[in-house]
Image (spheres, grey):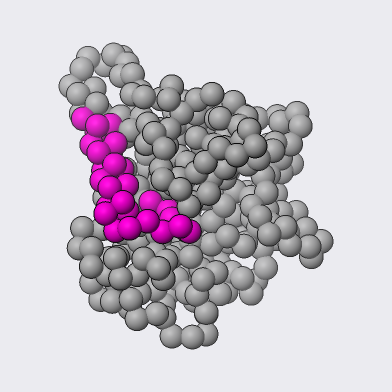
Amino acid sequence: MKPLSGVGLGWRRQLAHRIDQDAGLGFVEVLAEHLNPTAPLPVPLLRLKERGVPVVLHAVSLSLGGAEPPEARRLDTLARLAERLGAVCVSEHVAFVRAGGIESGHLLPVPRGDEALDILAENVRLAQAALPVPLALENIATLFEWPSPAFTEAQFLSGLLSRTSALLLLDVANLHANALNHGTDAAAVLSAVPRERLAYVHVAGGMRHGGLYHDTHAHPVPEGPLALLEALAARLGPVPALLERDDHFPPPEELSAELQAISAALARGVATWEAGTTRAPGHAVAAPGLTEARP
């Protein structure tokens, strides 16, 4: 996979004109389920191809964490869309969305145990074999956890990467949500990310409701995900990051401000990383702002 770089934005029809006018975007991400696999691609996406803007195809319906293998027709659709878009990779979630023919309508967490990890890894390998480009796996935000997990979230992601050759799409907004809702050790997850396996990073907004933090993709990005992004860049150096916005689309100046905030968080993290590389071996560099995203 050709490495992504810079700051990107999730492509939505409501944002198509804004994206079309932005020469500074590093890359875009397109939702597979928003495209008709048999119809011509939307003209704005064709223009992105002509401009040479890197495109990631993002999916939500493979159900890689389910007990059943991913459906061949869904994999075929993703493969064809990836080829038509000239996508650099396909990304999906560490989740399941169906069982026994019943659709959940939501991304559900995979039990963090050996058996579930074995099934997930096998489904990932099946998907990789069917896709013409690399596959990146995304951690999800959850409103509940299965009881008595055998692994922490960091251990589970590390185990998945060790059992497959897939890449990682690290969603710091989802990590922020899980830290607030479940006490997930965000620092441990960041420390478990190998730079050579990181495809890119998601950043998104959310809100508290009913005692829980909800990853809505429809509200401004709070400080927590930005602090996690900064900490990740402080450890790994420059990483590509993408803003997701799915609803309540803000005015152009507000969207630009969120993209600038992501760029600023990355710049602060990279400055810390660069300073750390000049220090003596073994001199630890503190992860800036990490405590802001923890409960």
Is 46 placed left or right of 120 in the picture? left
| Residue lying furthest right | 100
Asked if the stretch drawn in magenta spans residue 261, the answer is yes
Q: What residue is rendered at 50% in x and 35% in y?
A: 176
Question: Which residue lies at the image location 62% right of the left edge and 62% below the top edge?
Answer: 61
The x and y percentages for residue 190 are 44, 31
The front one of 94 and 134 is: 94
Q: Which residues are magenta?
A: 243-271
| Image quadrant containing the N terminus | bottom left
Up/down of 196 relative to 245, above or below: above
Camera-side residue of 227 and 200: 227
**Quadrant position of the C terminus in the picture:** top right
Q: Is residue 170 visible?
A: no
Closest to the observer, 218 or 271: 218
The residue lying furthest to the bottom in this view is 39
Q: Position of residue 84 (x, y in %)?
A: 41, 77
Task: Locate residue 31 relative to residue 289 in the image: left or right.
Answer: right
Q: Is residue 220 above or below residue 16?
A: above
Q: Position of residue 244 (x, y in %)?
A: 43, 53
Q: Going 46% across and 28% down the picture, which residue do you hit?
A: 293
Please name the residue shown 48% across and 59% down the image: 247
Tell me the quarter of the picture where residue 279 sits.
top left
Determine whether 289 is above or below 247 in the image: above
